[in-house]
Image (cartoon, rainbow, N blue to C red):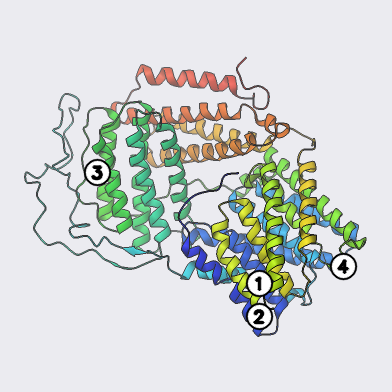
Amino acid sequence: MRAQRGPVPWAAVTRGALAAGPLLLAALLAGRASLGVVAAIAAMLAGINDRPGSRRTSVRRIGVPALAGAVGLLVGSYAGAHLGAFALTLVLTGLGLVGGGISAIGPVASGTGTQLLVTSAVGAGMPLPDPVWQTVPAFLAGAGWLLALRLLLPTPVSRTGDPRPGRGRGPYRPDSRFAPRPDKRSDPRPDPRPDPRPDPRPDPRPGPRPDVRLDFRFDGERAAVAEVYDAVAALLDAAGTEHAGARRAALTAALDHAQDALAGPRLRRHPSSAAERRLHAQYAAALPLGEAATALAWAERTVPKRAAEGPRRLAAAVRGNSLAGPLPAPARTDPALRALDAALLHAAEVFDRGRAPDLHTRRRSVAALVRTVLGAGGREYALRAGLCFGAAVATAQALHHGHWYGAHQHWYWLPATAVFLVKPDLGPLVSRVLCRAAGTVLGALLFAGFAAVLPRPEGLVVLVAVCGALVPVAARHFAAQTTVVTVLVLALVMVGGEPQASAGRIGETLLACAIVLIVGHLPVPGQRGGGVRARIDAADAAAQAYLVHVLGESDDRAARWTLRREAYRTLAEARAAIARAAAELPALARHSAGADEVAAVLERLVDTTTACAVHLDDTGRLTPRHTERLAALRDELATRRGRVGRSRTLA
C-alpha cells in the first residue's frame, strides 16, 4: 500500500505529454477521431510499460507487449463482430488462459499477457466504425510513436566525460596516499602492482582533455553499470555489520539491472561500437569485484574504509566515460582482500583498454520457456487469470444483452479492469482491489467535473496530454495510476463519441473487484502456491549447479560467474514472489508459508559458495569453517525442502 519514492522522471513525463495528446489532436485534425482514440490507447499502454532503463531494454519492454496488444485487438474485434455471447465468452476465456500462462515467464511476458487480454476486451467490447485493417495499424502506430520518443529524445542530463580538470587521464596507478606496504608474511607472492609514486602531488604534465559532448545513446546502460560499482562499495562499507545482507541483495539487483540493460535486442550479436564494447567490459570487470565483496561480507569482518574508495572511483569513471585514474590499493592480508585488490587492478586495466567479453548470461531455450508456462506456476497463473477474465466477460455480456448499460453500449471496462486486478506480479490481491476501487472512484469523479467545464474536443485533448504526462509519476502507486488512467480513458472514449459514463464505470469497477476477490480465493484443482514453489525450485537448482562447479575446482571463471549470476538472479525472483504471496490474505498466504526460510538458507548457501570460490582461488583448499558451513547449510536445506505451505518451523 506504500508509494514508491524517487526523483521525478522528467524524461518519461515529457514523452507522456508528447504521446497520446498529440496523436489524438492529429487524428481530430485529419477527421479520423476513432483511429486517434485507438492510437492514444496504445500510447497510454506503452507509457505504462515505459520504465527506467536503457533504450535497448525499452525496445523489448514496450515493443513486445505492443505486438501482443495488436494481436489481442485483432482477435477481439473479429470475435466480437462474428460470435455470439456464449462463443465469445469461451474464446476470451481461452485467451485469458494463454495470457495468464505466458505471464509466468517474467516481467516482459507479464506485460505481454496483460496487453493481449486488455486489447482483446477493448476490441470485442468497444466496436469502432473503422475496419480492423485500419485499427490494428493505428494501434501499432500509437505504441511505435512512444517507442520512437523513447529512443530518440535525450534524457535531461546525458553528457559523457568528466569536465573536472585532471580526471580521466593516465593509466592505472595505485594512489600512494592509500597504498599499504606489502606484507610478505601474509602474502609471499610478488606484488604485481607497480611501485607507488614517491611524490603524491598531482602529475603536472598535461594530459588529454576529457571528451565532454552530448551523447545519450548509452545513458541508461552507463548509469546501470555505475550503480553496480556503487553497490559494491556499499557492500564493502557494510561488511561486518547487520546491513551486509541488505547491501548484498542491492548488489544483486544492480547486477540484474545492468545485465538486462546491456543484453537487450540488437541487430548484431556482438556490440557494434567502441562505447558499447567498453561498457560491456566495465560490467564484466565488476563481477570479480562483487565476488570479492561478497566473500568479505560473508567473513563478517569490517573492511577498512579505503577499500570502498576504489569501486566508487570506478563508478565515477563509468558515469563520466573516463579512465580509472589512480585507485587506492587495499591491504592484502587475507584471501578476500587479495581478491579485491586483484579485481581492482583488473578493472583499472579494463577501463584503460577494455574489450567486450561475454555478459555471462544463460539464455533460456524455447523448451525451458514452454516448461515454465506448463509448469505448476504457469498453470496456477493461467487458471486464475482465465477464470477471472472469463467470469468478467460473461458478466459484462449478460449486462450488455440485458440492456443494463442504457445509452452506453461499450462493455469492455469490466473485463479490462479484471485483467489489471488479477495479475499476481502486480502486488497482493486485496491491496490491488482496494487501490483500484479507490482510484477509479476518484478518477471518475474528477472526470465528471472536468467534463462539465472543459470545452470539447480541445479541452479533452489537453486533458489527455496532461494525464499522459502524469502516468510515469502516478506509476509509484497503483491507486494514483488508476486515477490518472481512468481520467485519460474516459476522456478518450468521450472524444470517440461515447457520452459521459463516470457512474457506470464506478459500478463496473466495483463489480470487477468483487469477481476477482471471489474467484481469486476459490479452491482450484492442483496445489496452490505453485508460482512460489516454481521460483524456489529454480533457485535451488541454480544454487546447486553453482556449488558443484565451485567444488569441482574448475578454472573456467566465465562459467563460474555465469552460474553465480544465475543463482543470485533466481534467488531475487524467488524473494520477490515470496514477499507478494506473504502479503495475501491467509487463505492464499498459507500455501507459501515457509518459503522465506528456504530462500534464506539458499542465500546463505550461495554466499558461502562464493566465499569458497574466492578462497580456493587463493589457497587451493578450503578451511574447516567453509566445509562445516557448507555441510550445515546443505543439511538444513534438505530438512526444509518440500515443507513449503505446510509448516513454518522444523518441528
Q: Of the numbered discs in the image, which one, if any, rests on residue 82? A: 4
* Horizontal and vertical percent position of residue 113: 68, 54
> From mark 1 to mark 4, how far is it between C-alphas?
24 Å
In this image, 92 relative to 56: left or right? right
Q: Of the numbered discs in the image, which one, if any, rests on residue 485? A: none
The residue tagged 2 is 27
Residue 176 lies in quadrant: top left
> From mark 2 to mark 4, how far is it between C-alphas?
28 Å
Q: Are marks 3 and 4 in contact (CB under 8 Å)?
A: no
> From mark 3 to mark 2, how far is it between C-alphas?
58 Å
Q: Amino acid at mark 2?
A: Ala
The residue tagged 1 is 39
Single out the mark in the foreground, 3 or 2. 2
Q: Nearer the viewer, residue 471 or 87?
A: 471
> From mark 1 to mark 3, how far is it between C-alphas?
52 Å
The residue tagged 3 is 345
Q: Decide which of tag 2 and tag 4 comes sooner along the chain.
A: 2
Q: Are marks 3 and 2 in contact (CB under 8 Å)?
A: no
Q: Amino acid at mark 1?
A: Ala
